[in-house]
Amino acid sequence: MVRSLVEHCNQVWSNLNVGSVKSLEKLQKRAVKWIRNEPLASYTNDQYVEHLLSLNLLPFKHLFQFYDLRLFYKIMFDMVDISFPESISPVNPDSLRPTRQNLDIIERRDVTTLVFSSGARSHNVLSGSFFYRTTILWNKLPYEGSLSCSFRCVGSLGVCDDI
């Protein structure tokens, strides 16, 4: 029940502080132990993640990132009636200087990489906003992932099929 409430408005929940996410994670860890009938077990972090994946679940941090990316994908490809703020725009590969950082974008003609206008970056107020944090996360995805929904953290779970 807790998970369904958190998943309902995940763009709000995903901006929780680290301590709150850890508290949710502790609750989920207890639930996993109960489901696996191992109430007194002690899991390492890797074991815990392995047990979550066996139950088709993700740690909350990755769950929040997945839902943020899913909404972002829908916005980017006009699947929902939401648009990007004016401060976010796609990179034009033709206007980039060939540097080590930009060479990959130029060579593959990547139009899915997004940038903030210089004025938007200077405000700390935006740092926790959905568009700011998700744009950074989106740009960290492999190029193929940004187009085909093969997100690294969830591709093997098959939870991407309702995009």
Image (tube, rainbow, N blue to C red):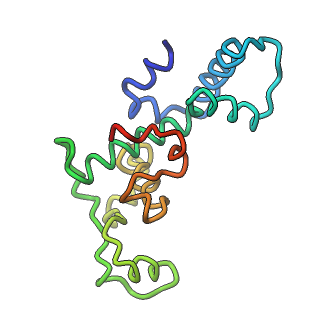
Residue at 28% from the left image edge and 46% from the top image edge: 74
Describe residue 22's horizontal placement relative to residue 78 as left or right.
right
Specify the farthest residue to the bottom: 98
Residue 9 at what x, y percent from top left?
Answer: 37, 26
* Quadrant of the rendered image containing residue 135: bottom left
* Quadrant of the rendered image containing residue 18: top right
Specify the farthest residue to the left: 81
Residue 79 at what x, y percent from top left?
Answer: 21, 45
Image quarter of the C terminus? top left
Residue closest to the eye, 135 or 52: 52
Residue 83 at what x, y percent from top left?
Answer: 20, 49
Residue at 39% from the left image edge and 58% from the top image edge: 146
* Quadrant of the rendered image containing residue 21: top right
Residue 119 at what x, y percent from top left?
Answer: 32, 63
Q: How many marks?
A: 0
Residue at 34% from the left image edge and 37% from the top image edge: 162
Describe residue 79's horizontal placement relative to residue 112 as left or right.
left
Residue closest to the eye, 37 or 79: 37
Residue closest to the eye, 146 or 92: 146
Say above or below: 98 vs 27: below
Residue closest to the eye, 47 or 95: 47
Describe residue 46's horizontal placement relative to residue 142 as left or right.
right
Residue at 31% from the left image edge and 70% from the top image edge: 111
